Image: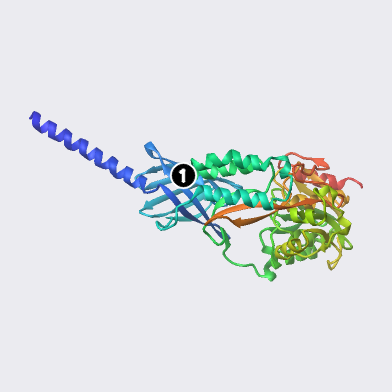
Amino acid sequence: MKSRLVISLALLLWCFHCAAFGQNKTAGQLDGRWYLTFDLPDSIYKSAVAFKVETGGAVKTANLGEPLLFLDGGTIDGNQLKLSGKSAYGNVTITADLAGDKISGKWSLGFVGGAMSGEREPADKPKTNYSSVFERTWKTFDEKFYDPNFNGVAWRGIGDKYRPLIAKIADDAEFINTMRQMLKELKVSHVGFYYSPFENAITAKKSVAAENAASFQPLTWKKISPEIGYLQIKEFTESAEAVASVDRAFAEIGDAPNLVIDLRGNTGGTLSVAMRLGDFLFDKPTPVGFFATREGLKRNKVDSMDKLNAAKLPVYSGYKLDDFWASMDKNGAVAITSGGRAPKIYRGKVVILINERCASTTEAFVAVVKEMNLATLVGTKTRGAVLSAVSEKTVGDWLVRYPKADYRTARGKRIEGAGVEPHVAAEKNKELEIALQTLKKPN
């Protein structure tokens, strides 16, 4: 009887060992680099993530891709994977099944959600030489960063500080966190460091025809009343459809004597929509600022944007980012003008809603209209992140984003690091209410 009990206990322990081994084996299959794909309502988003399973099934994540979604980590139990993350629109949860080198599941954000899938990076993908990527990244900033004085930071000293740290690193998570920490020391916006094996991290599912511009999501408009038009711009996107949307918006609400332009949460984009807005607000071609690269400063024989004579710079007034950079690469520095090209100039009273998430092109636009006394700004101070950046591959699929040009308003004011203050302060979600009260006041 005793021997049977011993055998039974041994079998039971062996079964537990097998179960634990099977779970660990499954969990261990998650370790490494994965390519994740998220099916969004209007686009497909792809990102690279490094997973590491710890004791007890806890999952650590290193977000390698461009920052539309940041995963905070999660758990794995058998082949059941649960992850949580953050996006600009709120917290995201993911539930998925792991099957070998594939993941399939769903993501959700409140009542919105969709499918997600993933696959392990191919085994024949070359291993990263972290020191090589570091050197190429450091050199890119050393040669191309917009400011020859590196924003007051001793860049060569930064390289000497981080070079030995990188030489000791053995995994993606520590590497990318260390690289991003190094770039933070420049204390400027528009810097980034990613691993991105995709041609495009975000791909639109379909284009929007110009005749359907009223439903183009980044721009929406309506009349709050016969006296007040409302135009919301969620993103300064670039396309012919976006420009057509601005035209249609003013055609449909531009006869109202008052206009609210809602830019809350707009983190910027390209010049396209902002330039077209200027066409409706300025009755003739008007200087709205100037940009300069490091090469531009050198060509003009100055060491600072503050010493440039904007009146003598070549002028750019187009709508396309590629054309803008072609002009910048040719001239090194350009003055931007907008206005006088709309079918009908809007001459009513304008109030613009802003908040702390407004950045880049959005801030440049509101800084200009404030400087020219064309609108009343309502809300909270903007972020203070106005530089023009480009992205380049370094080694393999490692990507660096760096600010290539600095910006000043037409009167020479720098917005980077300063932001734009509202004329009228308003608490969150009270901006529109305050704006409508402001419109009732006499000029």
| Residue at the image point whose x is 53% and y is 50% from the top | 132
Q: Is residue 75 above or below residue 115?
A: above
| Residue at the image point whose x is 39% and y is 43% from the top | 76
Q: In the rendering, at what x and y percent does residue 102 appear?
A: 39, 55
Q: Is residue 144 above or below residue 380?
A: below
Q: How is the image coloured?
A: rainbow
Q: In the rendering, at what x and y percent does residue 377 appear?
A: 81, 46
Toward the top, the furthest residue is 2
Q: In the rendering, at what x and y percent does residue 330 appear?
A: 76, 64
| Residue at the image point whose x is 72% and y is 48% from the top | 359
The quarter of the rendered structure image containing the N terminus is top left
Total number of numbered discs in the rendering: 1
Q: Is residue 187 left or right of residue 411?
A: left
Question: Residue beneath label 1, please?
Answer: 171
Q: Can residue 85 be seen? A: no
| Residue at the image point whose x is 58% and y is 40% from the top | 162
The residue type indicated by label 1 comes to Asp
Toward the right, the furthest residue is 443
Residue 344, picture quadrant: bottom right
**Callout 1 secondary element:** loop
Q: In the rendering, at what x and y percent does residue 277 appear?
A: 79, 60
- Which of the pair 231/161 is nearer the observer? 161
Q: Is residue 24 left or right of residue 350?
A: left
Q: Can residue 58 be seen? A: yes
